[in-house]
Amino acid sequence: MIPGPSSTVPRLRPAEWWTLIILLTIYALAYLDRQILTLLVDPIRADLGVSDVEMGFLQGLGFTLFFALCGPFVGWTVDRYNRRLIIFTGIVIWSLSTASSAFANSYGQLLLARFGVGAGEAALLPAAYSIISDMVDKSRLGRAMAIFSLGSIVGASLSYAVGGALVGYVGALDGIALAGIGALRDWQLVFLAIGAVGLPLAFLVFAFPDPGRRRAATTGAVAASASRQHFARHWRFYACHFSAFSLFCFLGAATTAWSATYMMREFGWTPAGVGALLGIKTLVAGALGMIGSGLIADWLIRRGRQDAHLRMYLYILPIHALAGIIAFLTPNMWVAFAALSFVSLISPFIAVAAAGLQLATIPERRGIASATFLLVYNLIGFGLGPPAIALASRLMFGDNANLGPAMALAFGVLPPVIMILLAVGLAPMRQAVADVANRDNLHRDGTPSASSASRES
């Protein structure tokens, strides 16, 4: 049931906080491995002789292709098997893949390593979303998802701040030779260091208990039939949700991929300098945006706005668009930095998007629903965003990688499309959330399909 304005809303328990903090730490590690590449664009280009378009592909589809391809299989396993073990396996795979990037001597080898990073990270979000939605009261789901999703903000900040400092440190070493391996370039040393950190941290996943699944006590055939009916009945919600947030991700991924390079080229910042400032900006503005959006969504839900997770971005997107246009057209670097801070304040939408998806999906199929969303979201957003901006820059604004106008154009064109999709999805979301709530109430009343929680071994 979605609580009304007068409902008593339980607080997160200590065990729930502990689980969220561990999952947040793992998510930060994932984002660090994913985003460290943004500070290494120019040195990799120089060593491997590739273009911005190829680097955009490396940051985009090079990561998201295998992330997306592995997503449906991971979602299927999340709905059936031990979720902590699934996350552990993913951490090991992406950490080894990041470390293996240190030994890449060609673009193809580096691309293969990025495929591995994407495949490993595909395990985290569907499993974490499933664990969190089974663990916390639904009236606090937005806040819980926001706390977990802070990991992406912390990880992105670390990729800028720690990554920038690490780039400066290894740059002063002018490469290093390892016994039995040979000389490694500066950017290769960064990959090796970041990848090595992940392996011991993988065991953190066993430091919290699995909460067990909330699932209806029905036969497999009945549950499968109910799942098909739910998805078929509410396809308009899923279509609008997936497409709107995927286009929103397109803007966010492109901004993340090219902000550091743009600031270094346009204003002459050093990697360490841009890393420190963008790291602080991402941590402060991103954290406020992530937690604030979750709290606002929960507040609206408690007041009966069952479409809150779409409605709030329908109203705020015009500000996001204006800030993005200013950030990439102004000749003043501090105005650009301030505008990018506003973008970072609004961009952390994933917690709200994930919470809305969980509320509108029956418990037995949240893993596959999350995995399917992440497939579309990552292919369109992280997959197409970075290379599309680089390609638009080359085709429309010359061969000098004039990234600013291309980014400003994206911020001018995409937000109106996203707003239309959000507006169309409001009524379908209300219907889907109401259906799930009514189903939960029916089970809670003790009918033959009463819900039961099953513990995993």
Image (tube, rainbow, N blue to C red):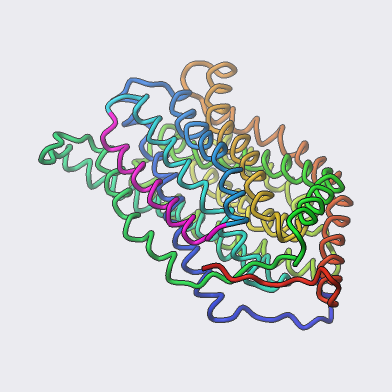
Relative image position of residue 168 (x, y in whole percent): 26, 45
Can you tell which quarter of the image residue 137 is in? bottom right
Q: Is residue 17 left or right of residue 435?
A: left
**What is the quadrant of the N terminus in the image?**
bottom right
Where residue 189 appears, x then y in whole percent? 24, 42
Q: Is residue 311 left or right of residue 209?
A: right
In percent of the image, x 73 and y 42: which residue is there? 244
What span is colored magenta in the figure? 81-104
Secondary structure of the magenta portion, mostly? helix
Q: Estimate the x, y position of residue 193 in percent, counting from the top left.
A: 27, 49
- Decide whether residue 127 is among the magenta residues: no
Vertical order, 358 against 412 (above or below): below
| Depth check, front residue: 231 or 352 | 231
Asked whether 204 or 232 is in front, the reply is 232
Q: Residue at x 60, y 56 (%)?
A: 80
* Residue 288 appears in the figure: yes
x and y, in percent, of residue 456 in the image: 55, 67
66 vs 175, left or right, is right
